[in-house]
Image (tube, helix red, strand yellow):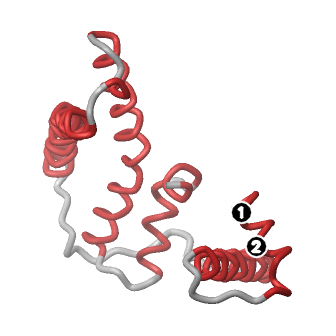
Amino acid sequence: MAVAVSTPPDRLHAALLRLRVPFGLALMAATALRFLPVLGAELVTVRAARRSRGRPAWQRSPTQWLRLEVSLLAPVVARAWRRAQNLAESLDARGFDPLAPRRLRRPLRLSIIDGAVLLPVVLASLAIGAARLLFVLYTTDTWYHPTLRPLYGVVRRWL
């Protein structure tokens, strides 16, 4: 979700093309990622509308709550379908052909600065994942090591 919010759709598309994903598939994926925040906002709007019409969802039984959540998807899917049809008509009207040859205006290159930023992010992500895994092993009584008690405390409190 963070990628969809923070990266412009043309850069997402260019990155997928750089990974040698076919043009039509890359366009579809970039467009889908672009509309994830829009779908989330629509779900929030539909929930607010439903909440204003009746009692809160947390006052229902779990089965009623699940039924309500599934029924919330109908208007969101209907709006997404309408948006997809508009996009398809727009692409068709402009003569879109996914098999036509194309070339990027600015080819993407991984610079030294990008690598310098990417390496610590990847290492931190791996360290956080390993810490979470060790904590899960500890909480499920699968594996415990007494020297890792400070790590267990940090994971319990912050992760």
Q: CA distance from mark 2 to mark 1?
A: 6 Å
Residue drawn where x is 27% and y is 71% of the image: 25
Q: Tag 2, which secondary structure?
A: helix
Quarter-of-image position of residue 37: top left
Q: Tag 1, which secondary structure?
A: helix
Q: Nearer the viewer, residue 149 or 158?
A: 149
Q: Nearer the viewer, residue 140 or 47?
A: 140
Q: What's the residue type where badge 2 is placed?
A: Tyr
Residue denoted by label 1: 156
Q: What's the residue type where badge 1 is placed?
A: Arg
Residue drawn where x is 69% and y is 87% of the image: 144
On the image, the x and y values in percent for residue 58 come to 37, 28
Per the rendering, the mark at residue 77 is none
Residue drawn where x is 70% and y is 75% of the image: 128
Per the rendering, the mark at residue 152 is 2
On the image, the x and y values in percent for residue 97 come to 18, 65
Quadrant where the image shows the C terminus: bottom right
- Left of 92 or right of it: where is 134? right
- Left of 42 or right of it: where is 11? right
Quarter-of-image position of residue 153: bottom right
Tell me, yes or no, whether the two marked residues, 2 and 1, touch with CB atoms within 8 Å: yes
Placement of 64 over or under 24, stated as above or below:
above
Residue placed furthest toward the front? 141
Quarter-of-image position of residue 133: bottom right
Placement of 64 over or under 11, stated as above or below:
above
- Left of 15 or right of it: where is 65? left
Q: Nearer the viewer, residue 119 or 131?
A: 131
